[in-house]
Amino acid sequence: MANYAAGNGDFPAIPTHGGLFIQYNIFGNPFEITSKYRPPITPIGRGAYGIVCSVLNSETNEKVAIKKIANAFDNYMDAKRTLREIKLLRHLDHENVIGIRDVIPPPLRREFTDVYIATELMDTDLHHIIRSIQGLSEEHCQYFLYQTLRGLKYIHSANVIHRDLKPSNLLVNANCDLKICDFGLARPTSANEFMTEYVVTRWYRAPELLLNSSDYTAAIDVWSVGCVFMELMNRKPLFPGKDNVHQMRLLTELLGTPTESDLGFVRNEDARRYIRQLDSHPRRSLAELFPLFQPLAIDLVDKMLTFDPTRRITVKAQSMLILLAARKIHLQTTLDLQNMLNFFPNYWELLQHLSSLCVFN
């Protein structure tokens, strides 16, 4: 039997099932993976759907991120989300989409309760960067936007809507490579199937979702990218709504109250009546509110944050526009991750208590 020593001290490695598996205790939670994943193991995040650790695959000599989804089959919707993510990641293959490396089997089939998914390992995410002291240049923001649009164009070309684009689902490395992750809410488009409206984290939710539309399109992802890009440049959320009503009020105060011609996509008469009774606001000029931002950036955001999804710019058009700006970017641009991590006096304590730092959730 192989001798796996003590991992990194805090997380001893205990061989199980004749050495075929290794079990760790991560913050009081068992974490059992096949023995090809060798210690030391490092927790890098935790959230509503489980714990994420980095570890070395001894067969490929590649460090990977392994997400444990505990009790994955206790809830039907959670199980469906997990299966959906695995199936989509197995089919998607793009530089700007996180790559799946492995789905680790259980030691015993009859005790299959937890799911372990291994993916490419990234350094951090945009949520973490936005809230750090890491400086971001115009080039950083443009390059992140370009890669997001590039990955999203690929996803949409496969007739898939991500449905949960937000800073924490955009992973990055120190060399500024960006990959879209967390496809648990993503789904193929279908003209004949009902679509649930309760998707996308509220701050990045398009108007059609706030109005309970069930026949939305990939345009909801474009709206989310516009919100993320503004947050990246301004270092704070554009529409931090406390609930759906507050969210809609923030939208109309900045983008103006929609006119009748903007409501062609709204089929629900109750939703139409709700919009008509809102206080009237003119559309404010983003260029005047954010005078330091490049005109090209403001123009793109204006087109992404269009109330009517049928008039919203598409990812294909965006990719062509931003490509022109991206040619000026030095691809050797890097992030000072050490400076970013030093912002927190006790990083491990932060990882234990803040679910927002979970890499994949």
Image (spheres, helix red, strand yellow):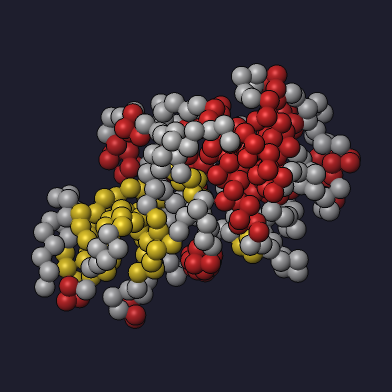
**Residue 312's x, y, as percent?**
76, 43
* Left or right relative to 20: residue 182: right
Q: Is residue 128 above or below residue 12?
A: above
Task: Please identify the residue farthest to the right as the structure is shown.
Answer: 260
At horizontal 68% and vertical 29% (from top left) the residue drawn is 296
**Residue 334's x, y, as percent?**
41, 34
At horizontal 72% and vertical 55% (from top left) the residue drawn is 217
Given residues 146 and 127, the one toward you in this image is 146
Q: In this view, does 310 lie above or below 293?
A: below
Given residues 327 and 263, the one toward you in this image is 327
Inspect this view and state whether residue 199 appears.
no
* Left or right relative to 314: residue 179: left
At horizontal 40% and vertical 33% (from top left) the residue drawn is 335
Q: Quadrant of the N terminus?
A: bottom left
* Left or right relative to 94: residue 221: right
Q: How many marks?
A: 0
Inspect this view and state whether residue 183 appears.
yes
